[in-house]
Image: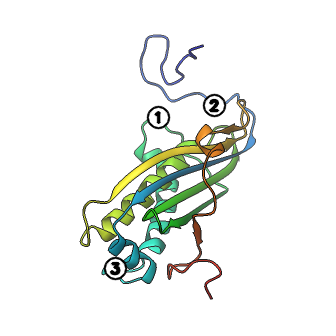
Amino acid sequence: MIEKLTHFDPEGRAVMVDVTAKTDTARTAVAKGRIRVSPPVLRAILEGTAKKGDVLGVARVAGIMAVKRTSELIPLCHPLMLGSCSLDFHVDEKACEVEAVCTASLTGQTGVEMEALTGVSVALLTIYDMCKALDKRMEITGIHLAKKTGGKSGVFVNDAECSAPEGNEARMDGPDGRRKGDD
């Protein structure tokens, strides 16, 4: 069944969706994406030796700032009063990949999927920018909505999340790029 697109009026003109009649509900969205890097780039990220500084710390701040400005970047996107936003990184050293995970939430009349996706995208682009002097062959992949809750449609979990392998990633904890538990 194909649903009607909501960003067009009866004449086919682009419009911002009217959410005034919607009830405020708690809404959360989680988006994920990865950047594949070379072993020297990954080493620079983890050891904090990239010339531009703390790669993951800067990428975290950039992603959160992007979440807050999503309505300025995406046409017809509602400006939202966010309740919270976090951006975490998981490193798969074997695959030479850094995964960004952005979680955005609020209580309101519309969801935060675009905000979470924007946060992940900008965080990964920031990693690329900060490391491109070392290697321009980095590849950003797999940006997707992993999960969303709230609103009329309720809970959505991306099928890719149900089959994701576990155990290879280490949660990145701080701006120094050290893994949680590596004290």
Which image quadrant: the C terminus? bottom right
Numbered disc in front, either 3 or 1: 3
Report the Cα–Cα distance between label 3 and label 1. 37 Å
Q: Position of residue 74 (x, y in %)?
A: 43, 41
Residue under pointer 2? 19
Look at the image and tell me whether residue 153 can be seen: yes
- Tell me the kind of residue under disc 2: Val
Q: Are marks 3 and 2 in contact (CB under 8 Å)?
A: no
Numbered disc in front, either 3 or 2: 3
Residue under pointer 1? 76
Residue 148, image quadrant: top right
Report the Cα–Cα distance between label 3 and label 2. 45 Å
Residue under pointer 3? 50
Q: Are marks 3 and 1 in contact (CB under 8 Å)?
A: no
Which image quadrant: the N terminus? top right
Q: Which secondary structure, mark 3? A: loop
Look at the image and tell me whether residue 69 can be seen: no
